[in-house]
Amino acid sequence: MPSQTPIIVALDFPSRDAALALADRLDPALCRVKVGKELFTRCGPDIVEALQAKGFEVFLDLKFHDIPNTTAMAVRAAAELGVWMVNVHCSGGLRMMAACREALDKANGAKPLLIGVTVLTSMEQQDLSDIGLDIPPQQQVLRLAGLAARAGLDGLVCSAQEAQPLKAQFPTLQLVTPGIRPAGSAADDQRRILTPAEAMAAGSDFLVIGRPIAQSGDPARALAAVVAELA
Ligand SMILES: O=C(O)c1cc(=O)[nH]c(=O)n1[C@@H]1O[C@H](COP(=O)(O)O)[C@@H](O)[C@H]1O
């Protein structure tokens, strides 16, 4: 049953064939799937429909970040695709997020969960400092979470390292956490990481996992190992 699983597998592939080949090796009862910028830019909405036809709920991860009207209309278009979850960058500001909320509230039919990206899990303190934010990532995450809560978003993308304080301050927000690395796997370009079990214990609601499953020799087995770790 899709609604019972916290696992979202990122289909970060350059082609429809590669994405569907992985999807065919996964069980929609054990995970949802995420379509991000690379796959969507190559394949468009068709890939979302193809995955839905295979029984998967889809997180459309295009991290919209633009003026309020443009972002709200993009979110509305995502809703019309029937996706389960869609995200925008919190750093687009309160008015931008509120416009997205309003657009979804006015839309007919099923509404995706509207999720705000706080600080990318690939960033650490030096990266924030480089863009003029001389504060620790957690402080910036909490600040953006406050804005997202005021705008009526359903949840946040953050590192599981911030899940505990976020759950304490914003108990109704769903926490979607990438930067998940089973013990022993490479961090790659991620910086703020935790293992699946650590992330769930910290308060994550959903775990986004890409390369540790997608690039493993046996994705079904890698997914089963994460399911077993969480059991
Ligand atoms: O919004 C996201 O999904 C996201 C936000 C974030 O802060 N960090 C992050 O890694 N992601 C996405 O989560 C996935 C993580 O993939 P892996 O690092 O391969 O597990 C990628 O598809 C990223 O685009």
Image (tube, grey):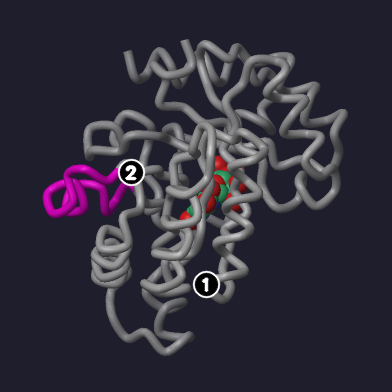
Q: Which residue is tagged 2?
A: 175
x and y percent of residue 105 in the render?
Answer: 43, 48
Answer with mark 2 or mark 1, whichever residue precedes in sequence: 1
Ligand 1 within 8 Å of disc 1? The answer is no
| Residue 108 visible to an observer of this rendering | yes
Circle 1 Cα neighbour tier, 10 Å, few/some/many (<14 / 14–19 / ≥20): some
Magenta region, main secondary structure: helix
- Of circles 2 and 1, the one toward us is 1
Position of residue 33 in the picture relative to residue 196 (left or right): right
Q: Tag 1's secondary structure? A: helix
x and y percent of residue 49 in the render?
Answer: 74, 29
Residues rendered magenta in the picture? 160-173
Observer-nearest of 116 and 11:
116
x and y percent of residue 54 in the render?
Answer: 71, 15
Give, as a three-letter code, the residue at label 2: Leu
Measure how far apart labels 2 and 1 are at the Cα level: 23 Å
Q: Residue 95, relative to residue 114: is it above or below?
A: below
Q: Could you tell me which residue is drawn at 57 percent across and 58 percent down?
A: 63
Q: Tag 2's secondary structure? A: strand
Q: Could you tell me which residue is drawn at 74 percent across and 15 percent down?
A: 24
Q: Residue 70, relative to residue 51: is it above or below?
A: below
Position of residue 101 in the picture relative to residue 185 (left or right): left
Q: Residue 104, relative to residue 83: is it above or below?
A: below
Q: Which residue is tagged 1?
A: 68
Pointers 2 and 1 in contact (C-beta within 8 Å): no
Residue 115 painted magenta: no
Q: Quadrant of residue 129?
A: bottom left
x and y percent of residue 74 in the render?
Answer: 63, 57
